[in-house]
Image (tube, rainbow, N blue to C red):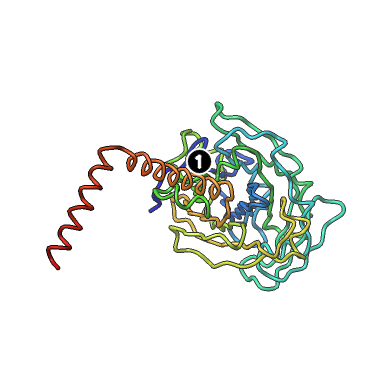
Amino acid sequence: TFRGLVRGAFRMKSFALWCDAKNAGESTGVKVLMNFNLWAEAEKGESHTVLDVGVMLIPEEKSSKRKQICEVVKSISFYCPFPLEKKNFENLFPKMDNKTVGAIFNSPCNYTKNDIYSVGYVTLYGDDAYPKFAICSCDNVQFEEIDDKGTIVKIMLTNTMFPPESDREYEPIYYRFRLSGMFVSNLVASSHSKDWLLTSAFSREEVIDFRFNDYRSLDDERIIANIYGKNKDCVRINEIKVHFLLMSLMSIDVNSDSNEGKGRRLLEKDIWNDYAPCVKDFDNVAAWHWTKKLEKNDGYKINLMLRRHICNWKTIVLYILVLFVIDCFFNFSETVIMSLPVVENLLTHLKEALVSLSLTLL
C-alpha cells in the first residue's frame, strides 16, 4: 500500500487493445503478446518519460491451412486514455536491428529486413513458443478521438505488408511504436509522503499506476465491449500475455505490488544506443521486468513506488538558513529577556540565596 499524496494532472486511466475484424462475425481468433517499456529515466535533474508499445498477433492454431492474420484482422486498435497528437507517435521499425530485437525478446536471433515489403523476418534461437515471426512497419496509421477522453490509434493491416504465402512460417506479426508527450509523462506522478519535508533534500518519491484492459478505469462502454469480445466487428482474443518493463536509473529504489517480477538487469550500451529515446550514458540505466498472463475478463494493473536519491542543494541551503534564523531568534530573545529589570532583580536575589545557603551548610 502506498502512503502519501500523489500529485499529477490526473490519475491515469486504462490503456486498451482490440483487433477489428476484416469480416463481421469472424470466428477465427488470435492470441496477443504485449510489450510495454516505460522509459522514466532522469538526466541532470530533468525527467523524460516515453512509453514503447509492442503488439504481437499470434495465430490461434499452427495448421498450414489456417487463415492468415491479414485475412482475419483488419486493424489493431490501441486506445490511449488521453488526447494524442500525431507528432507524439513514432514508428520504431526503423530503429530495430538484430541486436535490439534479440534484447527485446531476450534471445539470440537472426533478423533480416525485406527490401520489397515493410517487414523484417526474425528467427529466435532460444524461444520455442514463437521461434519465427515478422516485424512490420507502422506505415498506415489512423488516429480517432473519442469525445476528448482519449485517442484510438489504428494500425491498418494489408496483404502487401506481409510476406507471401511461402513465408507463412513467419506469420506471428509484431508492431512496435513509441508514445510521448505531456500526458505520457503523467504516467510517472510525484508522491509526497508524510516526511517529505525532511527527506526532499535527499530523495524524491514517484508513483507509477499503469493499467491495461482494465474495465474499472475505462469510461467508454463501447471500448469495454470491444476488449471483451462483445462486438461482432472485433476478432476474438483467446489469450493475452503482458510484459512490462521499467527503464530507469539503476540507483533508484523500486517497490512493486506485483509478485510477477523477473528481476533487474543493466542495459547494454552497444545495443540500445540508437534505440533509446534520450539516454546517452547506459552505465547506470537498468530495466525492471514484470510479466503476467491475463485471465479471462481480467485486465493488467501494476503500481510502482520509486524513490530517487538526489542531492538537492537548494533545499539543504534553505534548511541551514532556517536553522540560522532560529538560532538568531533565540539568542536575541535571551539577550532581551536577561536585560529586563525584573529578571536582573530575580537573578540577584537568587544569587544571594545560593550564597546564604552555602554559608549555612558550611
Identity of the residue drawn at 77% across and 59% down: 273
Image side of residue 298 versus residue 173, left or right: left
Q: Nearer the viewer, residue 270 or 198?
A: 198
Tally the marks: 1
Question: Could you tell me residue 317's position as x and y percent?
Answer: 55, 48
Identity of the residue drawn at 72% across and 51% down: 278
Name the residue that disc number 1 marks: 12
Identity of the residue drawn at 38% across and 42% down: 335
Question: Could you tell me residue 12's position as x and y percent?
Answer: 50, 41
Q: Secondary structure at mark 1?
A: loop
Image side of residue 4 versus residue 362, left or right: right
Question: Could you tell me residue 313's position as x and y percent?
Answer: 59, 50
Q: Is residue 119 visible?
A: yes
Picture quadrant of residue 84: top right
Q: Quadrant of the C terminus?
A: bottom left
* Residue ranking furthest to the top: 147
Disc 1 marks a residue whose amino acid type is: Met
Q: Nearer the viewer, residue 237 or 106?
A: 106
Q: For mark 1, does the 10 Å Cα neighbourhood hold few (<14), some (14 to 19), or many (20 or more) residues?
A: many
Picture quadrant of residue 248: bottom right
Q: Nearer the viewer, residue 154 or 164?
A: 154
Image side of residue 207 versus residue 97, left or right: left
* Residue ranking furthest to the right: 115
Question: Could you tell me residue 69's position as x and y percent?
Answer: 66, 51
Q: Nearer the viewer, residue 295 or 280?
A: 280
Identity of the residue drawn at 70% across and 61% down: 133
Residue 66, placed above or below residue 227: below
